[in-house]
Image (tube, rainbow, N blue to C red):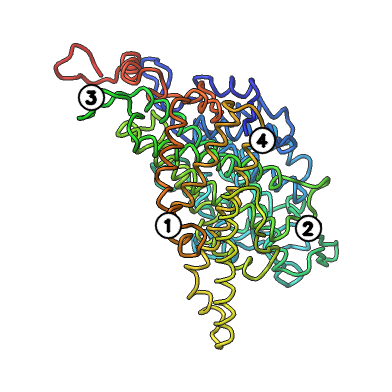
Amino acid sequence: MTTPYDADLVALLADASFDRHTPPPAAAAPYPEPAAWAYEGLRRITAAVGGGKPLLADHRRLRALLELTAITDPVLFHVTFLHHCMTVGPALDYGATAADIAELTSGSAMGAALMTELGQGNSDADIRTEATYDARTREFVLHTPGPEAAKYPPNVGLPGVPRLAVVSARLQAGGADRGTCLFLVPLQDARAPHPGVVIHRRPPTALLPLDYATVSFDRVRVPHHRWLADGATIDPNGVFRDPLADPPTRTGRSLSMSRFACGAVTAGLAAAARAGVSIALRHAGRRRTHDRLAGAVPALAHHNQRRLLFGALAQAFAATALARAATRDSWEIPDGGGRGHGPGPGAMRRFALAKTAADRLAEEAISRSRSAAGAAAFFSENRLVDYHALAMAFRSACGDNQLILLDAARSMAAGIDYAPPTEDAPDHWLRLFRARERLLHAELTAALRAAEALGIDAFTAWDTHTDLAQRFAEAHLARVTAEAAHAAYRPGEPPSGSATDIRAQLYQLFCLEEITAHSGWYHEAGLLTVEDTRALPDRLAHTCRTLMPRLDETQAVLDVPSALTRGPLAGPDYVADLYAQLEERPPPFPCPGRGHTV
């Protein structure tokens, strides 16, 4: 699974200026505003790494950059993926001009994606922003018809940052609705918003703090060349032609730009999970506890700590295996752009489900790491709470996890690019996962057929069975994730005791936890005996004990550069490192009872 990082990327991000939570110890150096700090960091990264070319041309290097920025600071990761994936990606895929791509890849303008709208929740399916074609000037008039159509909540509220955004709008051309299309729209320059662009910055938020805003358009003129036409045309006589069949198909194609986010977010979440587990494991391995029975022992001498952290380690491992496969496909752009031929529904479903799986695994892994680290994990200087914030944000961002699961279940139940898994599997664990998915699929489709036979309307039939549908989609997700984890440890590779062997243990631990969570169902289905079910806790405990003496090797498997996991909790001596920071940067108020400030 390990993908060694290029030394120049690690060295770049290890620079002290990329440490937002611990500024240089200059006497009065203020803590930076997160948004301003992040955009300056993005400019430096783009100048140092991009070389004026789209990073999407090199999937391995882009994925490495996103993983490393997520480890360094989720705020930096957020602006990096929005620029290099969600703005440059659609620009390349849907046909932007070379000049606009050069403006983005040079870093002279920061990218943004303005998709969701205030009155539509996190749904992009019913965009209200209008783009009306003016045949006289060959321009598009971008307009927000009401407050419900304001774009919300893109992080574009900081003044003075030149912005070039991908904006979704419903195209009106030749007197007809042509579906949702994409446009490249400059929002502001270094001085002010562009005429007709209205930006209202939202109040600050504690989690993933950036310059979130609402954006409205008051008859903003967009030149023809900034329509990301994707193969569609409007001739000088105003005749509209589209290689796609109809407006709904065009809307679906425009929404498929989310694939660039899915790949990026999946990679970032997995990296944040690995970083959180790495910090917590390192701390637990040296933190002394005072047990009433054993006296002073390391935290990891306790079974509950091992279960928390080695289980989290297995989840981070599985998320990474899934993520590194997802980026390869989700970022693929045919030569010359997509021109109306993007990924099919099955592929889009896989990308969205990969994001959902990575987010769920990352949120649980980081939560467990925070629990193991105690009160210290609450503070951003130790990074865990920031990693957790990233996972919590993407529970709904980039598609709501539950809605993704239900949409996937519905399309799979309808047989769209899906067939239930066969019984054949490389090992016992995968046979169990495949059997659960297959049986739940059969149960769901049978229930829907029975409802149809009774004349129950489609909405009621589906709504009645959404709990079953979600269980089926979750079973599918568990199976796909387990298969990715199985492939990542490369079974059969010698020698025992190597990193391969540790990956095999992590794969088994992931499977044991997933099976244990549904052990009653497996027993009722006749897939586990009573003895099998009762043995699961002991097998979990044994696997954790097996990993206990190999903490240094597990750190290598996590592949988290120590230079990027900053903060006292990540250091060799938490107390000494914390007080060293206090001595380097004394705040300007006295500490009662001591001879200096704290």
Asked whether disc 2 touches disc 4, contact meaning CB atoms under 8 Å apart, the reply is no
Give the residue number, with chain letter if any, for mark 3. Answer: 295
Spot the residue most to the bottom. 455
Between discs 1 and 3, the one toward the N terminus:
3
- The residues bearing labels 2 and 4 have C-alpha atoms spaced at a distance of 43 Å
Q: Earlier in the sequence, mark 4 or mark 3?
A: 3
Residue highlighted by disc 2? 340
Q: Furthest residue to the right?
A: 236
* CA–CA distance in space, label 1 to label 2: 54 Å
Question: Which mark is drawn over residue 530?
Answer: 1
Say which quadrant the C terminus sits in: top left
Say whether marks 2 and 3 touch (CB < 8 Å): no
Q: Which mark's residue is nearer the viewer, 4 or 1?
A: 1
Q: Amino acid at mark 3?
A: Gly
Q: Which residue is labeled 4 in the image?
A: 492
Residue 304 screen position, x and y as percent: 34, 38
- Place residue 54 in its image quadrant: top right
Q: CA distance from mark 1 to mark 3?
A: 37 Å
Above/below status of 503 relative to 524 = above
Instruction: Report whether 23 appears left or right of 139.
Output: left
- Mark 1 or mark 3, whichever is nearer to me: 1
Q: Residues within 10 Å of mark 1 (few under 14, many from 20)?
A: few
In the rendered image, residue 365, in percent from the top left (x then y), is placed at 45, 41
Q: Indicate whether 258 appears above or below 453.
A: above
**Numbered disc 4: secondary structure:** loop
Q: Position of residue 553 (x, y in %)?
A: 52, 25
Q: Earlier in the sequence, mark 2 or mark 4?
A: 2
Which image quarter is the N terminus in?
Answer: top right
Q: Residue at point 65% right, 28% down? A: 494
Whether residue 231 sits left or right of residue 166 in the image: it is right
Check disc 2 and report its element: helix, strand or loop. loop
> Is the Cβ of the residue at disc 1 closer than 8 Å to that at disc 3?
no
